[in-house]
Image: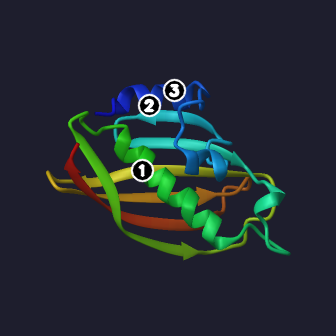
Amino acid sequence: MPSWANIMKRIAAGETEKAPPHVTALNLYAGELTVLEPGRIRFDWPVNPDYMNPVAVFGGYLATLADQTCSFALMSMLEDDRNFTTADLQMHFFRPVTSGTLHCEGHVLNRSKNQAYVEAVFTNDEGKMCLKARAVEKIIPA
């Protein structure tokens, strides 16, 4: 059974050696976790040109970051005898991500015994919204 609090502490400390293979392959821990509260997280992701199409960060990669942001927010308050999986992820893109730092905030808006509704908002260095995501997380026994 995972200890979600311990996983989040390791992520906040930058200890990524126990990260799942997909996290390492996609370089998902590249950002710095700056807020870690029950049901709320924030991390700052330096825009990496390796993930850009000719003009902006690839939308599929941003969707992956959004899924991770929503997952982190839920992990920050999930009991150790529970696990979860993303059942639905909706993306809304407002402006291209081209440079600087992407500020990713995740909030658990509602949680029941079997699911959570989580939102992620990404802003650029000017404070302008780049994208917003909404996820439904299915909560299951570990």
At mark 1, the secondary structure is helix
Give whichever of discs 1 and 2 has the lower sequence position.
2
Instruction: Determine the CA span between mark 3 and mark 2.
Output: 5 Å
Q: Is residue 9 above or below residue 34?
A: above
Q: How is the image coloured?
A: rainbow
16 lies left or right of 107: right
Quarter-of-image position of residue 51:
bottom right
Q: Determine contact: label 3, label 2, CB under 8 Å.
A: yes
Give whichever of discs 1 and 3 has the lower sequence position.
3
Residue marked by disc 2:
7
Q: Is residue 64 above or below residue 72?
A: below
The residue lying toward the viewer, choosing from 37 and 18, is 18
- Residue at the image point whose x is 81% and y is 59% from the top: 50
Quadrant of the snapshot with the C terminus: top left
- Residue at the image point whose x is 48% and y is 59% from the top: 67
Categorize mark 2 by other alpha carbons within 10 Å: few (<14), some (14-19), many (20+). Answer: some
- Residue at the image point whose x is 44% and y is 31% from the top: 7
Q: Amino acid at mark 1?
A: Ser
Q: Amino acid at mark 3?
A: Arg
Residue marked by disc 3:
10
